[in-house]
Amino acid sequence: MAVMRLATQTGARATARNTRRAAAKPRAAHPSTPAAPARSVLCAAVAEPPSPAGSAVPFASDIFKVDTVEVAGETEYIVKGGRDKFDKLPQALVGIKNVGVIGWGSQAPAQAQNFRDSLAEAGMGDVKVSIGLRPSSSSWQEAEACGFTTEAGTLGETFDVIKESDLVMLLISDAAQAKLYPRILAAMKPGSTLGLSHGFLLGVMRNDGVEFRDDINVIAVCPKGMGPSVRRLYEQGKEVNGSGINASFAVHQDATGNATEVALGWSIALGSPFTFSTTMEMEYRSDIFGERCILLGGVHGICESLYRRYTAEGMSKEDAFRNTAETITGPITKIISTQGIKAVYEALGSDADKAEFMKAYSASYGPSKDIIYECYEEVQSGNEIKSVCMASERFDKFPMGKIDGTEMWQVGEGVRANRTEVAIHPFTAGVYCAMMMAQIDTLREKGHSFSEVCNESVIEAVDSLNPYMHARGVAFMVDNCSTTARLGSRKWAPRFDYNLSQQAYYAVDQGASVDPELEAAFFNNPVHEALAVCASMRPAVDISVSFGVGQARESFKGNTNA
């Protein structure tokens, strides 16, 4: 197996490690061998050793300019995107004539259309982008509505598309990947590239004790936002060059010697303003963990716990909603997006409000980090991935319900229908910023680079998810995102809710004083500098949330196996 030296681990040590793995673990089936037997979801968790802080991954490209940037005193490596880079796509994607996008959930409609549009603009009309679905899939007609048809040879049965594709972009649900990966890998052509937008499959295969075939490339390009954001900002980028959603990329296995160029070309074609490097393992750790914490589960827990607190204190239901969900997804999100986390505190108009913020921050940081750390280690160990696989097997008996019928979210529908200007609520802001900073600190302590930390904990929240929450509600996101995220929010949001209610808010009510060390750590955290660097590369356009525009789907259908 050829191993990409720069995008995984460097030198002979990485080669030796992979040689030992090859001897110790079975590899997925080659096309000439039968598919592996059905996987068991009751598999042993594989714990990984801790990584050093600041684990930026260097890489090289012969096609795209690799920039080094200093981020809070650490050197990181990025490629800047934009439509002016499309003329390099023919070089980056040399040898790729058939691109198979498998699935039609949140990411697939956006990525398939962005890729197709970029190839056309690059003059690569001989490269075909096809969609692979089950013939019975309810998404078939939606794919046709986006211009993918059987007549043109751009819409077909899943495994027919896979076996013809030089680049297989596997964008089906995590549960479907876990079930189908032996057949998928067996169907791929030697020398082709398996492309993922989420490292979940690596975690599944590690739990199963299986490695990828050694005659294919395995890469990941992971947009730091949901599919509708990826499509909408790409379209806005037609007017403002470079508008889009940032992405990380990883080269897990380089069988052909050009896997890095393919990954960078893919990211450029999606419209990523900048692309940073990671490893597939670090990606799935930060991604699965992040959606359970501040991106979705955490904000869900904050909103419900504070709604109960405020109404119990005598606030009207409508004002309680405004001072929880609305203030987070509205003014707090806007300030963090454009000015950073510390600016939320600085935007408060009085010393009393600032004192209220810091009181909530000091009380909430520890209880938030308690749950955040546990969540990270559950993902790192493989337990959380195993939990998702097992839960998916129970759906026929215990399907997921929705949360949007409960009082808070019903009140929210009325508030959004008659929306008025909302100010920053200082206590809510303190709780939210405390959880965000606790997530940031946990990722840093676990060895993630600042680019990964900022994108997974901050930028994805305030530039992708929160604007959609503001338009449709937090409950809408919880009920309509990917299966893995929906399961995670339902599992972890109550943990945040209870810990905040039982520890943080109780401490405030008992008159707990502000911890001066936590206060100083908030103001002096190097992430503020890191976010300023990221903001300097941010496109000068905010996402325009208009559902259905550009066929960025209103229902994300992340819970399908299409």
Image (spheres, rainbow, N blue to C red):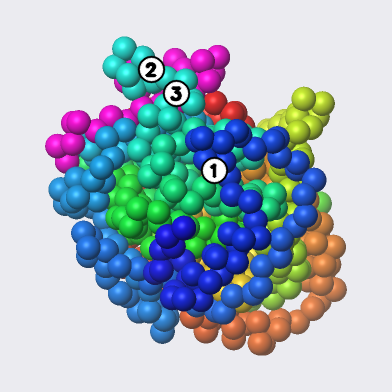
What's the CA distance linking mark 3 and mark 1? 38 Å
Asked which secondary structure carries label 1, the reply is helix
Asked which secondary structure carries label 3, the reply is helix
Q: Residue at x 75, y 64 (%)?
A: 374
Closer to the camera: disc 1 or disc 2?
2
Badge 1 density bin: few <14, some 14–19, many ≥20, Cα 10 Å? many
Whether residue 204 is visible, yes or no, is yes
Q: Quadrant of residue 389?
A: top right
Residue 144's tag is 2
Q: Which part of the image, by quadrant, shows the C terminus?
A: top right
Describe residue 152's horizontal placement relative to residue 281 as left or right: left
Give whichever of discs 1 and 2 has the lower sequence position.
2
What's the CA distance linking mark 1 and mark 2? 28 Å
Asked which secondary structure carries label 2, the reply is helix
Indicate whether residue 146 is drawn in magenta.
Answer: yes
Residue 80's tag is none
Label 3 is placed on what type of residue?
Asp
46 vs 393, nearest the viewer: 46
Label 2 is placed on what type of residue?
Glu
- In the rendered view, tell whether residue 273 sits above or below residue 183: below
Label 1 is placed on what type of residue?
Met
Q: Position of residue 397 (x, y in %)?
A: 82, 26
**Residue range corresponding to the magenta coloring:** 122-149
Q: Residue at x 22, y 42 (%)?
A: 238
Q: Residue at x 38, y 29 (%)?
A: 164
Q: Residue at x 39, y 69 (%)?
A: 6
Where is mark 3, residue-wise?
160
Residue 469's tag is 1
Describe residue 33's horizontal placement relative to residue 409 as left or right: left
